[in-house]
């Protein structure tokens, strides 16, 4: 049933397009007749003649379309064999159209039958000129079909490239996750082992926070994009573990505009940035350090900033 509806829709679109072409050429023919002061040739007559011509092309054009899809002209590299096939094909289509076209016109036009009592005489008078016109129309159809085919191939290539880029990004993100989790777990377990004897309550707190962190990790393991709200919840869980490690030496502030919380961001995009800030701005210091996470929306863009009050890489290199 679906194919039937699709075929009817295509047929309606095909004949609708050729009807529009017929109306345009009928208007041109009628305007030319008025310019020549030919009052006998009205718009209805012009439309009838053009409908006969272009409805025949509506019947033949699907065959020409299939031929063009079967033997596309390719220029990189040049497919000479397919190109040579179009010369006999176009001649055949133009000849078939002209034979049928003149036969139909001769049968439905009394004036033409009076002028040419035999159909063969009509062919002798009009076939040559009409054949060249049909050859041009057939060539234009082939050009239009190839333009459509090139556009479809271009779109398919773009979609394939987009899919490959997406797959590459997903693979890179999965690789990042595989690198981050063991690294983070090693640091956390090392901190827990050192706190078990020194400060058991703090060790228990870190274990609980680590459990929450792993739960959130498993819940989002297959997601490449999450909302900024979910990403910051994951980040808060990570920071709670780090704050147990660093105590008062680490303070964190979140400044997130409400309009940004629903924005989609890559999962784990913030955690390595914040970890880098802790490693270079908080860990080397004995005094208190501060990290600020800010999110703002600028029209359709999302801007997320992670700032710390550390000395900076340039200053640290100078001091060393």
Image: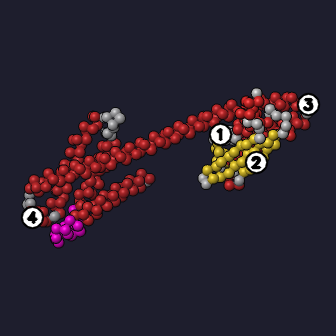
Task: Say if residue 214 shows up in the picture.
Answer: no
Question: Callout 1: 10 Å neighbours few (<14), some, many (20+)?
Answer: few
Residue 199, image x, y percentages: 91, 33
Kindly report which numbered mark, 4 or 2, lies closer to the viewer in this rendering: 2
Residue, disc 3: 198
Secondary structure state at the residue bearing disc 1 = loop
Sequence-earlier tag: 4 or 2: 4
Residue, disc 2: 254
Q: Which mark is residue 230?
A: none
Q: Distance between the residues labelled 4 and 2?
A: 93 Å
Contact, mark 3 vs mark 4 (Cβ under 8 Å)? no
Asked if the magenta segment contains residue 45, the reply would be: yes
Contact, mark 2 vs mark 3 (Cβ under 8 Å)? no
142 relative to 181, above or below:
below
Horizontal arrangement in the rendering, residue 288 relative to residue 173 (left or right): right
Q: How far apart are marks 2 and 3 (CA)?
A: 31 Å
Give the magenta part as a residue range.
30-49
Q: Residue 222 carries which label?
A: 1
Residue 158, image x, y percentages: 47, 42
Sequence-earlier tag: 3 or 4: 4
Q: Distance between the residues labelled 1 and 2?
A: 26 Å
Sequence-earlier tag: 2 or 3: 3
């Amino acid at each position: 049933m679906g194919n039937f509806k699709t075929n009817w829709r295509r047929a309606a679109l095909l004949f609708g397009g050729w009807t529009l072409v017929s109306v345009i050429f009928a208007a041109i023919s009628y305007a030319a007749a008025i310019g020549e002061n030919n009052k006998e040739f009205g718009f209805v007559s012009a439309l009838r003649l053009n409908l006969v011509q272009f409805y025949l092309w509506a019947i033949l054009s699907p065959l020409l379309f299939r031929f063009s899809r079967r033997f596309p002209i390719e220029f990189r590299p040049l497919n000479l064999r397919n190109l040579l096939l179009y010369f006999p094909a176009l001649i055949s289509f133009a000849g078939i159209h002209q034979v049928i076209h003149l036969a139909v016109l001769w049968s439905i036009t009394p004036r033409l039958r009076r002028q040419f009592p035999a159909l063969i005489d009509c062919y002798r008078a009009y076939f040559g000129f009409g054949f060249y016109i049909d050859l041009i129309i057939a060539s234009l159809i082939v050009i239009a079909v190839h333009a459509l085919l090139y556009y479809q191939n271009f779109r398919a290539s773009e979609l394939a490239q987009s899919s490959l880029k997406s797959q590459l990004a997903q693979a890179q993100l999965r690789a990042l996750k595989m690198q981050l989790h063991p690294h983070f777990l090693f640091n956390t377990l090392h901190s827990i082992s050192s706190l078990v004897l020194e400060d058991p309550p703090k060790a228990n707190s870190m274990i609980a926070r680590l459990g929450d962190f792993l739960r959130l990790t498993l819940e989002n393991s297959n997601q490449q994009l999450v909302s900024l709200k979910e990403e910051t919840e994951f980040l808060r869980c990570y920071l709670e573990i780090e704050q147990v490690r660093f105590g008062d030496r680490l303070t964190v502030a979140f400044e997130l505009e409400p309009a940004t919380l629903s924005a989609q961001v890559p999962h784990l995009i913030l955690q390595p940035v914040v970890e880098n800030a802790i490693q270079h701005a908080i860990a080397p210091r004995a005094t208190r350090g501060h990290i600020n996470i800010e999110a703002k929306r600028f029209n359709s863009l999302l801007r997320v900033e992670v700032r710390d009050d550390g000395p900076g890489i340039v200053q640290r290199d100078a001091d060393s």
